[in-house]
Image: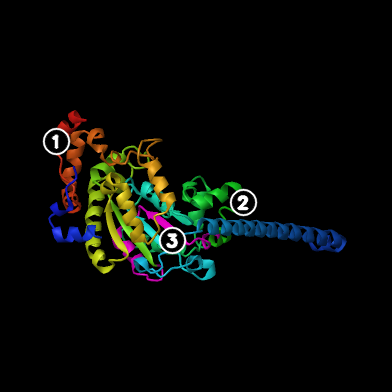
Amino acid sequence: MISMVSRCKDVKTTQLLWSGWPGPVLSDVEIRPRIVKIQESVTAYVRGASDNATNIEIQEVLDQQRKVIEREMQNYEYPNGKYGLNISKLEDLVMEKGGTPMRSIILTSWRSGSTFLGDVVNAHPANFYHYEPLLDFGIVQIREPPLADEALTNIESLLNCNFHNLDRYLEYGKTGHPWVFNHNTHLWRQCQIHKKICWEPRFISKFCQLFPFQSMKLVRLRLNVAENLLAQKRLGIRLILLVRDPRGILQSRKHREWCPTSPDCSDPALVCADMVSDFNAAARLIKKYPHSFRVVRYEDLSVEPYKYVKDLYAFYGLDFHANVKRFLDTHTKSDVGGVSSTFRNSKVAPFHWRTDLDFEEVDEIQRVCESAMRLWGYVIANYKRIEYREKEA
């Protein structure tokens, strides 16, 4: 079992944490001036007509989505002073009307429960979901410049609904990586119907500006870099660091073909060095940003999903809407689908490492991860304890 947080060496620090991408020759023109003129006019007309048709299509989609959002937000319970948020109406949150959206971020690493938690937040009405916006960076962890500078610039552009300088990111999604958008429920629904405009920056930017809520999950950015986002008050983000037992992380990553060839994903020493770095950053940030930064362990969330999701929604300043409860009711009771599915028996999902890993694998992880495990409150397993649990199961 996972130890209580108070078993960590630095009890006070740990308790504080939990509280918290050639023209025509001259003779041609002289002999056939009318033909040339007609050809140019036709070309210009076709191009202009095409652009106009695209603009009309974009406007129709935007008008339709505004109505959808207004309908979703009927009878919504705005914070109106709660959680330090003076928000009482939809216009306060809509960028195209001069408002500032409520922005929530989940920061973690691969196979740490972020797909599940990201979908929990995306179950909220009128939410625009930035799903892993650093996908085009590859299987790397971003810890320092120069990657950190580029990553932060891209993230800020997304949070400000500015897709015009994200050519690499959009091209990556358009050429065989649809998950850049397909987790964004509202956007992907329109992309299925309006394929021509789906990856157009002018469309996505305007579409994004309609939404009162934005969520984002990041699995490639370490916390010491993400601090730059917390420091920008105009963004107003609230960030959660999601932590998971390294044994569970590495067991889950075994099932992903893209992981074993990338040290940042498969090397226990690198995984746990990042966990130590995140702990040290978290201990500082929880004091510096007590109202906009918090930590949660995946195991705690899984064992008591309703309790922790309610707490996290309150931290984000979001209403625990009926849609969210419905999501939990249907996604936490039984296993359905493959390794990327979010339909899970949540009380069992975090602990598959106990039966899926040989003790030699467990022991190898524990030897290099002892410090990280101690800091985050995870108990070292021994052979007899695992053998007993297997027989008991």
Vertical comparison of 10 with 324: above or below: below
In which quadrant of the rendered view does residue 226 lie?
A: bottom left
**Residue beneath label 3, please?**
77
Label 3 and label 1: CA atoms lie apart by: 48 Å
Q: Is residue 112 visible?
A: no
Sequence-first disc among 3 and 2: 3
In which quadrant of the rendered view does residue 84 lie?
A: bottom left
> Mark 3 falls on what kind of element?
loop
Q: In this view, does 271 lie to the left or right of 341?
A: left
Sequence-first disc among 2 and 1: 2
Q: Is residue 130 magenta?
A: no
Label 3 and label 2: CA atoms lie apart by: 36 Å
**Residue beneath label 1, please?**
385
The number of numbered discs placed on residues in the rendered structure image is: 3
Residue 333 in the image: x percent, y percent? 35, 38
Vertical comparison of 379 with 106: above or below: above
Residue 101 is labelled as none
Magenta extent? 207-235
Identify residue type, mark 2: Lys
In the rendered image, the quadrant that contains the N terminus is top left
